[in-house]
Amino acid sequence: MTHQPPADARSVEGLRQLMASLRDPNGGCPWDLEQDHKSIAQYCIEEAYEVVDAIEHGTDADLKSELGDLLLQVVFHSQMASERAAFTFNDVCEAIINKMIRRHPHVFEASDGRDAEGQTVQWEEMKAQERAERGQDDSILADVPVGLPALTRAEKLTKRAARVGFEWDKPEHILDKLEEEIAELREAMASGDHQHMEEELGDVAFCVANVGRRLKIDTETSVRKANAKFETRFRFVEASVAASGRSFEDHTLDDLEDYWREAKRQSGV
């Protein structure tokens, strides 16, 4: 059986029809038919990161394309759920619309005059109430997704804990803790115990994320920018090696450091 492309390629309904065709046991795509929620879960994360990358480095055309890829994941999961009569895409829309109305009483009901900070507190209070109504774990750390990038999750965990007063007085105190953790990492390295080193390295990274939160800097974004900076500088080193007519093996580390310093000088950072 041959399926026809959706008549309306500019609507969510057209995208839903497309996904239904791909999942049709009679003439659908074999790969799409083999998938389930777990097998494609990773793509939600990957597509979300590609959206962020398009925002930071791309054009509007890139962002449009990547948002489409991310939307496809929502439609894909909704289609699979509808096939087992669990929920539909419309149910997903209804759920998020109702949730956003419920969490924005200052917009859809009489305003209580709260500022942005006050509304953030109210938002968290509502989320806690929703968790309680669902009978979820009553820990303040409940429902911080384990699938988040580790640094992002560290920030969210420490933010939650800070709401009940489990917080350093000043960001500088976290730096003191960071130095303490680095010293413990040095001790672990000296011992040669790999498991101990892994644990202490994790503590260092956790502290760094906490510093970022207190400074109102998204640590994940900060590290992404550091990655991009490293890539730019190392590509300069590669170009410099190539221009020298010698291989990497023919350069000393001091030679390579000279190229690196020149890359920093040219970038002005």
Image (cartoon, helix red, strand yellow):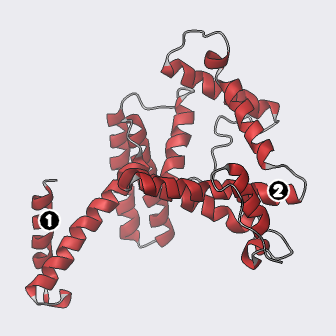
Q: CA distance from mark 2 to mark 1?
A: 52 Å
In the depicted view, which residue is nearer to us: 46 or 175?
46
Q: Amino acid at mark 2?
A: Ala
Q: Is residue 1 visible?
A: yes
- Where residue 122 appears, as percent x and y from the top left, is 61, 21
Q: Amino acid at mark 1?
A: Ala
N-terminal of the two: label 2 or label 1?
Answer: 2
Q: Residue at x 63, y 64 (%)?
A: 42
- Where residue 226 appears, as percent x and y from the top left, is 31, 57
- Where residue 190 appears, as percent x and y from the top left, is 35, 69
Helix, strand, or loop for circle 2? Answer: helix
In the depicted view, which residue is nearer to us: 131 or 183?
131
Q: Residue at x 67, y 30 (%)?
A: 100
Mark 2, residues whose alpha carbon is within 10 Å: few (<14), some, or many (≥20)? some
- Where residue 30 appears, as percent x and y from the top left, is 76, 78
Q: Residue at x 69, y 26 (%)?
A: 101
Residue of label 1: 263
The extreme right residue here reads 85
Residue of label 2: 81
Q: Are marks 2 and 1 in contact (CB under 8 Å)?
A: no
Q: Is residue 137 visible?
A: no
Q: Tell whether 139 sits left or right of 2.
A: left
Please name which of the two marks, 2 or 1, marks the residue nearer to the observer: 2
Q: Tell whether 99 sits left or right of 68.
A: right
Mark 1, residues whose alpha carbon is within 10 Å: few (<14), some, or many (≥20)? some
Vertically, is 90 above or below 61? above
Q: Quadrant of residue 160?
A: top right
